[in-house]
Amino acid sequence: MLRSLILMAVIAVAAGPAVAQETIRPGQTVRGELTASDPLSSDGKRYDCFQVQTQRGQTLQVDLLSSAFDSFVSVGTGGCGSMTVTANDDDSGDGLNARVTLEGTGNVVTIRANSIIPGQTGSYQLTVSQPGQAMTTSNGYEGVDTGTLGTARPTTLPRVTSESGTGLAQCLGAYGAIVEMNRAGTSVRDYGNVASIDYLERFRTLAGRLRPNDPVANAVELFAMTFKSSALAGAIGLDPNGQPNGGRPLAEYLTALGNCDREWSFTPVTAY
């Protein structure tokens, strides 16, 4: 996992006053932002609240990701400010990202999203998922599950450009994503010269440029997840709503890899 390549964090407990709670459904990702106007817990941490309706016997995974702060997520019952916490987590996800798994009992579960460090604010992504389920988000690609690979896999990919940058965080994320997908044996490696390139070595080379406590490391995980999700959506050939995408998101990802190769002087350059 990428967190073993980058960094680990510590665990703590957060609490807070009553606050409006947004509904989130299993299979949904929402994007939000912790701001200075959000409720403040007694230990100085801003937080947002969500509620999810569970089904008896249903396994749900809650992921809180952020490149702006060290995420911490709690789940429980009752209102957010006075909730009875049944589980919480700091870094069981990748890097500094938080993850909690729970078993549904048919009840409504409250989710509290915050930073583990008092005063931190910024954007985040919260996902509630079930094993083997494709996610839906604002752009339709993040969170696509690997279990659906091959449903409508394109044999050729379009020629496209990529809007992704070639900075250290973006390229570390791009290389980290392909390392994970290659280890999983996904069909992404079937295109062009992808299978012949040692992306782990490229990842390690760039990771060696990070400074101790470099905030760039926090952003790498989010970039890697986004790149991976886009690549898998393209390899499937369908977006989460079942609409054909012609492999375009995978083509954009492979193009981004090639751009990173050129920017950081790696050869051979990724091609498809």
Image (spheres, rainbow, N blue to C red):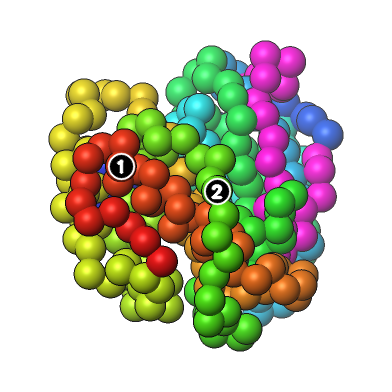
Q: Residues within 10 Å of mark 2 (few under 14, many from 20)?
A: some
Q: Assess whether residue 29 is covered by the magenta stretch.
A: yes
Of mark 1 and mark 2, the one earlier in the sequence is 2
Q: Amino acid at mark 1?
A: Arg
What mark, if any, has residue 262 been given in the picture?
Answer: 1
The residue type indicated by label 2 comes to Thr
Residue 83, image quadrant: top right
The answer to whether 193 is drawn above or below residue 202 in the figure is below
Name the secondary structure under disc 1. helix
Choose between 51 and 272: the one closer to the eye.
272
User: For this view, does 120 lie left or right of residue 180?
Assistant: right
Relative to the observer, which residue lies in front, 78 or 131?
A: 131
Q: In front: 118, or 172?
A: 172
Instruction: Give the residue drawn at x 38%, y 77%.
Output: 190
Q: Quadrant of residue 35?
A: top right
On the image, which quarter does residue 151 sit in? bottom right
Q: CA distance from mark 1 to mark 2?
A: 14 Å
Range of magenta residues: 21-41
**From the viewer's perspective, is residue 263 above or below residue 130?**
above
Q: Taking 153 as reference, is 181 above or below it?
A: above
Give me the residue at 62% from left, 83% from top.
152
Element assignment for label 2: loop
In what quadrant of the picture does the C terminus appear? bottom left
- Residue 77 appears in the figure: no
Residue 161, numbered label: 2
Question: Is 200 left, or right, of 122 in this rendering?
Answer: left
Q: Residue at x 33, y 33 (%)?
A: 168
Image coordinates of residue 25 in percent, x first then y, are 77, 60
State yes or no: residue 235 in magenta. Answer: no
The N terminus, quarter of image: bottom left
Name of the residue lying farthest toward the front: 159
Residue found 29% across the figure and 24% down from its top: 214
